[in-house]
Every structure is written in C-alpha cells, then in structure tokens.
Image (cartoon, rainbow, N blue to C red):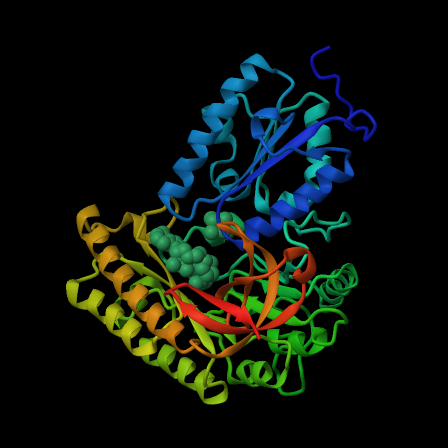
Amino acid sequence: MLFSRACDPMKNASKKYNIVTFGCQMNKADSERMAGVLENMGYEAAEDPNLADLVLYNTCTIRDNAEQKVYSYLGRQAKRKHQQPDLTLVVAGCVAQQEGEQLLRRVPELDLVMGPQHANRLEDLLQQVFDGSQVVATEPIHIVEDITKPRRDSSVTAWVNIIYGCNERCSYCVVPNVRGTEQSRTPEAIKGEMEELGRQGYKEITLLGQNIDAYGRDLPGSTPEGRHQHTLTDLLYHVHDVPGVDRLRFATSHPRYFTERLIKACKELPKVCEHFHIPFQSGDNEVLKAMKRGYTHEKYRRIVKTIREYMPDASISADAIVGFPGETEEQFENTLKLVKDIEFDLINTAAYSPRPGTPAALWDNQLSEAVKSDRLQRLNRLVSVCAEARSQRYLGREEEILVEAQNTKDIHQVMGRTRGNRLTFFPGNLEELKGKTIRVKITEIRPFSLTGEVM
Ligand code: SAH
Ligand code: SF4
Ligand code: F3S
C-alpha cells in the first residue's frame, strides 16, 4: 500500500521533520506553532532537510525575490522525493496562500499546500495526506486557538500573536490577500499564553500583528465614550504584570492609528521597552497617497516628536520602500530628508517589487530596475550613517542587556539586546548568563551593534 503511514504518534516515533522559514516574524511564530504540532505527533527535529521525512517550507511572497527563493528550495526536495516516495512535502505560508492549486500544478510532488490561517490545523491536514490525498487548504477560516505548545527557537524571548491578518489595502502589498481579514485573539487567550511563557522562564515577549494598532477593533465591546474596549493600549495594561516576564515589545505599528494614549502607556509601564517600529514607507506625501497609507510625512514626524517628548531616548525603527511606481527623484529625496531629520536607529529598506493581485503592480509608471537599485543603495548608505550616529549615544553608557545567546562569531562572548533593541555583545559565559538582565558598559559601537563589558 502506498500510503500506509497512520498519524499515530508511536508510528512517527523515529520520523524527523525540518521546517525552513522565510519572511517576517508572523511566519516565524507560525513555524514555531507548527513545529509544536509535529513534535506532539511524535516527530523529532532534523537539522538537515535532506535527512528529514517531512519537510515544510513556510513561505513569504512580500517581494518577488522572496517567492523565487522558495521555488529553488522546493525543486531540490521535489527531486529527492523521486528517490524517497514516502517523503512528505509541505508548503505553508504566504506563497501557499497566493498560489494555492497552481502550486500543485507547478510542483506535483507536493503533498500539502496550506495558507497561514491553517497553521494550527497542521495535524488535521496531515491526517488527510496520510489517508492518501493531496491537500490544498487555502479557504478563509476563523483561526482556531492553538491547543499544542509551540516549539520556540529561543528559551529567553518569545512571540505572541495578538491579531492575525490585515484590513489595510496599501496599494503595493500582498499581505491582506494572503493573511486575510483581521482576527484579534481575546485578551484572556493572550494573557493565558503569556502566563505560561512566564512560568516556563521566558523573559521577553513581543506582541505581534501586521497592523498591531488595529488590535481589538473586531472584538465586541466599547467604552461609554464609544472607543473600542479592547485596544492595544488596554491590552498592554491587562498583560503588564504577568509574573516572570521582564520585558514587553510590540510590532508592527501603523502611523495612521498610532495614539498618544499608547505612547503614555509605554512611558508609564516599566516592562514596555522604549522601542517603536513604525514603518513610514515614503517621506513624500504624493507617494504616500498613491501607496494608500492614509497619513502624511508631517503626521509621521509629529508621532516621533511626541514619542521623544515622553521618552527622549526612545529607539525608532521603520521600513521604507524606494522606487514605488512614478516616484520622481525629488520624491525619493523627500524620503532621504525624512531619514536624515528623524535620526532612526534602524530602517529595513526595499526596492519596490510589483506583486500579483495588488493595484500598483498594474500601473504603467513602473521604474526601471536600474533606478530602483540606485535609490536603494543611496538610501542604505544614509541608513548606515544614521544608525552609526544613533549608536554613538550608547558609548560609555551603562545599559541593561537581556542575554539571549552566544555571539556566533566569538564563543567567549554572549549576545543580548538593550531595551532599545540594539544588538550587544560582551564577554561572558552563556550558561551562567542566559535569560539574565546584566548591566553592561558600552565600550565599542558599530552602526547596528554594540560591544561592552560587565560593570
Ligand atoms: N504591516 C507592516 C508591514 C508589513 S510588510 C506595515 O504596514 O508597515 C513588511 C515590509 O515589506 C513593509 O513595511 C514594506 O516596507 C515592505 N514591502 C511590502 N510590500 C512590498 C513590495 N511590494 N515591494 C517592496 N517592499 C514591500
Ligand atoms: Fe501591508 Fe499595509 Fe497591511 Fe502593512 S498595513 S501589511 S503594508 S497592507
Ligand atoms: Fe512575507 Fe507573509 Fe510576512 S508575505 S512578510 S511572510 S506576512
């Protein structure tokens, strides 16, 4: 019989899985939950995908190069399946959602294609595969609360999803197509997961959402003033005192919905770190309008100013896109100007990539690859200069570093982060320091990282 593997934990006892994750923190969090499901089914982790009985690609389609990477990885495993027919091949995540059935036509060796909303259903879906079907799960569903424990990569820091999906329609972006409409988890479910993390010894939790400021607007309940009862700000107060957890972060913030109430809460709540990730995408109002972002660069500047009034040393990071259709040299320079003026700690930059199913991909004012890559290089140079200038303020200062791991380049050093999220290395023994918050004097700076010594 061709499909004889039952989904019986005993039978899977010696089976190995490997998950390769592309893309953003949502995907990383989903991968950890899917790994938890597989381990619950009796699978063990394999370092090398070529030694695994089940290979799962959790994919990203935010830009064309992210998508193409998936196909080249998949090709290799599809070949292996010809020698090893009982290899189970799964494509999850955003390419799976975008391509659906088409992916099976392109790579017929696949057993399962599953969109991000189906991550918690992995066991169910695999059962159908083991029963002999090739399965595509991309229909929109209500995301069920997870019953198995995620297998987290770190034992110090953890992600907790608070809202799935995105209801914005930025004209360049595939996320609403592939992640579906917003679905907030209840404050009780979120707090429950965080309490469990606290008990397990996790010290830092990052609350996640594509547009985290939208949290709660799909949940029932409003205040007498007509405000949603469950905003991100309310949630921060609700979960702040979870025992064991020392630091809280959240991402990603949308300038359109970012409130002063939230800023006040961050100032008031000691565990919430002074770091804000607020993508601006462009520094030009015309481009922002064409992107359908719903704010101006003036509004963005006001947000940052307000944050710094409350917390003068707060770190600000962002995402930016260059070469959006129709972007003139002058409009691009407005982005450079914003970057110079704000003094960001870090910016993730990207050249615009036309994505299937998004309005901007169909416009006839696309820029050439040469112009896009020239602008990207110019922006990156500036970002690095600004980041180094921002790092400068740390020199000689005492910082609290939460130790996460070894410095991969120097086994005598450990790695952690400042409250402002700057990567920091210092001499020390991981076994002794892991999960501890250590006071470190910063002795050396680089644009994106610091070195220090224990006080
Ligand atoms: N929800 C977040 C961003 C999610 S996508 C927000 O609203 O800002 C992560 C980043 O990828 C975006 O901030 C954007 O800078 C980039 N990105 C999204 N679509 C893109 C595209 N078509 N081309 C280039 N970069 C893109
Ligand atoms: Fe994409 Fe805009 Fe939603 Fe961010 S807010 S995920 S950029 S559509
Ligand atoms: Fe990529 Fe999907 Fe995240 S497209 S950036 S993995 S939401």
Quadrant hosting residue 204: bottom right
Q: Is residue 240 left or right of residue 66?
A: right
As drawn, 353 above or below 394: above
Residue 223 shows in the view: yes
Q: Quadrant of ligand 2?
A: bottom left
Q: Residue 11 occupies which quadrant of the picture?
A: top right
- Residue 177 visible here: no
Q: Report x, y in % for residue 328.
A: 17, 62
Could you say which is closer to the camera, residue 2 or residue 139? 2
Where, quadrant-wise, is the N terminus in this rendering? top right
Residue 179 position, x and y percent, is 53, 51
- Residue at the location (26% across, 66% down)? 382
Name the foreground residue: 308 vs 123.
Answer: 308
Camera-nearest residue between 382 and 403: 403
Residue 286 at x, y percent in the picture: 25, 69
Q: Is residue 180 left or right of residue 239?
A: left
Above-or-below relation of 325 to 229: above
Considering every residue shown, the one lying at the far right of the view is 10
Quarter of the picture containing the C terminus is: bottom right
Residue 439 versus residue 379 in the image, above or below? below
Question: Is residue 375 left or right of 38 when viewed as pictured?
Answer: left
Residue 52 screen position, x and y as percent? 63, 27
User: Vertically, is 75 above or below 83?
Assistant: below
- Residue in the picture at 41% in, 63% down: 448
